[in-house]
Amino acid sequence: MRSEVISVGTEILLGEITDTNASFIASQLPQFGIDLLYVSQVGDNPDRLREVFARAWGRSDLVFITGGLGPTQDDITRETVAWMVGEADQMAVDAEQERILRAMMERGGRRMPEQNIKQAMLIPSAQPLANPRGTAPGWWVEKDGKYVCVMPGPPQEMTRMWEHEVLSRLEKLADGILVSRTLKTTGLGESTVDEMLAPLLSSTNPSIGIYFRSDGVHARISAKAATREEAWRLIHPVEDDARRILGQAVWGSDDETITGAVGRMLRDQRLTLAVMESATGGAVGSAVTDIAGSSDYFVGSLVTYSGQSKVDLGVQPEILAMHGLVSQQTAEAMARAARERLHADLGLGITGIAGGDELEGQPPGTMHIALWDGDEMRYSHSRYYQGRAVAKSRAVLQAMSLLREYLMARAANAEG
Amino acid sequence: MRSEVISVGTEILLGEITDTNASFIASQLPQFGIDLLYVSQVGDNPDRLREVFARAWGRSDLVFITGGLGPTQDDITRETVAWMVGEADQMAVDAEQERILRAMMERGGRRMPEQNIKQAMLIPSAQPLANPRGTAPGWWVEKDGKYVCVMPGPPQEMTRMWEHEVLSRLEKLADGILVSRTLKTTGLGESTVDEMLAPLLSSTNPSIGIYFRSDGVHARISAKAATREEAWRLIHPVEDDARRILGQAVWGSDDETITGAVGRMLRDQRLTLAVMESATGGAVGSAVTDIAGSSDYFVGSLVTYSGQSKVDLGVQPEILAMHGLVSQQTAEAMARAARERLHADLGLGITGIAGGDELEGQPPGTMHIALWDGDEMRYSHSRYYQGRAVAKSRAVLQAMSLLREYLMARAANAEG
């Protein structure tokens, strides 16, 4: 099945918003074995909209359209779709949709401007797609063996509609289901993972792809079958093999983040964590608390951006004087101080240079990270610079990797 | 001048990467008065590439193409452009480009695989565009009064090439330059700004647009003229009028962030800032330290995620017991503790609920923010929920707005 995506909106072509709907839809289609061949963005211009819609209707079996469903004169996606499928004359207000629309406006305490009535219009080939997060319903059009899926532009409305209204319809269309399991690793290079998994790589269903990503190398196992269950039956033995081969390098799978994986391990091992961070400015604490339920194990973070604040919170001034603000010794002292001051099981200390100029002879991107459990000290450092934002996010990843290694070793010791 | 953008790459259509090049280019074109009418994304497929390129060449005066310039068999953008402008037979290795390519590979300590030689190819109509961040040069093609600008897909290579090679060529093409000044406001609604600026809105050059954005209402003043200088001469008097009308509501302009504006005021007023934050988990400290030079005024942040850690760092347990973790009184006690513990001029305290369930009868999204200077206490609160990430970033904005109001009032008092 050949599909394409059209994103409608002049603000996209002015560069005021980035079109994330298209990449969201693109990432969802492989599971249904639906090929995406084209993505187009076009402004709210009647002629160009007709041109782009007509071409899509001619060459694709399934057309996804987002945007242009608002109540104003500029919003002409509905009218253009009606024209495209030859039902321009048959567009009319649907009584049920009108009732829903008026009820929604009244609940918001607003009187409905009469021009908004166009949002309740349907054509004979269209089923409405409910949109509880906005006023514009979507359309699911079936005609001449082809399909059009029309959704609103705001991403939170679009993704909600996708999950609740569109997915089930796509499952019925798919002549097979593609399911993937992504194993996420750390500490191994792309070619090493490739070599290790070589015995599995000749398989075509499931197939395995190796990808280098910002949080490590990923191995994606994908299987196609008539049903989801059957696809999973193909994946499971290969996943087991891959996990056995890669061993402890696998820190998580699919949508899991390394921060989430570390959080799970902290909770399982009933350990609490405290941080003292400087160069990251609070980014480590912020990442840890992005995980729901992190209050089970996260006590807090002392963001000590000045030398004096480090001393105020328990770093010995002699260490700073002797080794400098950016050093292994200072990171270790910060780890100790965090653990002690916040009464946690584990203390993590991070010092470095996130941006700007050299400090104490060390270039931007230098990070010293230490982990202290009251008995054992672990340390890691790195030097990598592509701007402040990258330096901070890499430091967060590196801190999580150090924590993970420690927690893996601890769990192994407990078992052994 | 009618332009369009084509982004080439199968990984875009698989949803593995979001195409940010297109929105970057889109945001750059208005200054040259160049209209962007279409954006297309297409995979590395010879037939579809030809189809999309040929249509663009037929309907547009200027075509931007990114991606598909790598050394592999899959990378066929160069070949397809040569075909599109009728010079497929004339594509040949350029001696100078070959020299640059080999020198670059050698500097990296690698021997150049012979297939990479295709990256040194040119056609008669193309000028090479230097790419010091990668191996693939771009092409600037002029033919039959039309233009094609071919750039590599990796964003850091593309934007570097844009700034150093493409901008100057576009300036020559433009029949006028459009310049904009955006004034950013806080505390006023969209319709209020609209009413206040009504006397200026009838002007067409410069024109004024009012936009609602996540960090407040923006007023954008845009002027078109033959030269950049002339455009600025049109903007300046209108900008002066708008600033006089909007007064203290304007916190910054153009690319400035409110965090940067507050940082500037702290530096000017020689004040230091300390934070105690819980629900934001370190996001306030991280945002403040995203600004280069923030160590001049930022001392640190105490991320106290647990009740005990608040007490450990100076919040009186009676306040927590009497008013709860999420309350005005606790935010105020946190502001006092931050200022005292970190020896800063100003203490900012933030407590709230960033996600998950209700706490102490208050819904997710509730934020209490207090600012203490040792003499005066300011307080603000809000309740807005669209998920954890939004709750955190809105709390950061709100904290910065509170700080800004304080610093404005303080500066006014000092003057008066």
Image (spheres, coloured by chain):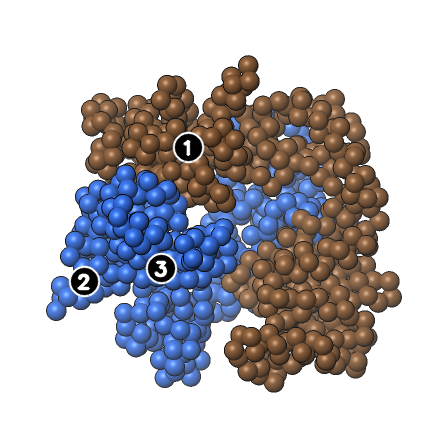
Chain colours: A brown, B blue
Residue B361, quarter of picture: bottom left
Specify few, some or many for label 2: CA neighbours under 10 Å numbering under 14, 14-19, or 20 or more. few
Identify the residue position indicated by label 2 in the image. B410
Residue B398 marker = 3
Tell me what residue is drawn at x 42 percent, y 32 percent. Answer: A272
State the separation of the CA atoms marked 1 and 2: 42 Å
Rendered residue at 58%/39% (across/down): A256
Q: Residue at x 30, y 58 (%)?
A: B328
* Protein chain holding label 1: A
Q: Position of residue A73 (x, y in %)?
A: 61, 80
SS of the residue at dot 2?
helix
Where's residue A187, x and y in %? 54, 25
Task: Please give the name of the residue rendered at 78% of the width and 70% of the height, measured from the top-left corner.
Answer: A126
Compute the Cα span from label 2 to label 3: 18 Å
**Crowding near pointer 3: few (<14 within 10 Å), some, many (20+)?**
many
Horizontally, is A395 left or right of A72 in the view?
left
Q: Are marks 2 and 3 on the same chain?
A: yes
Circle 2/circle 3 CB separation < 8 Å: no
* Label 1 close to label 2 by CB (< 8 Å): no
Q: Is residue B295 above or below residue B268?
A: above
Q: Residue furthest top?
A: A416
Q: Amino acid at mark 3?
A: Gln
Chain of residue at mark 2: B
Q: Disc 1 marks which residue?
A: A272
Under mark 2, the amino acid is Arg
Secondary structure under tag 1 reads: loop
Q: Residue B415, relative to residue B394: is it above or below? A: below
Residue A368 x %, y %? 37, 28
Q: Quadrant of the C terminus of chain A?
A: top right
Chain ID at mark 3: B
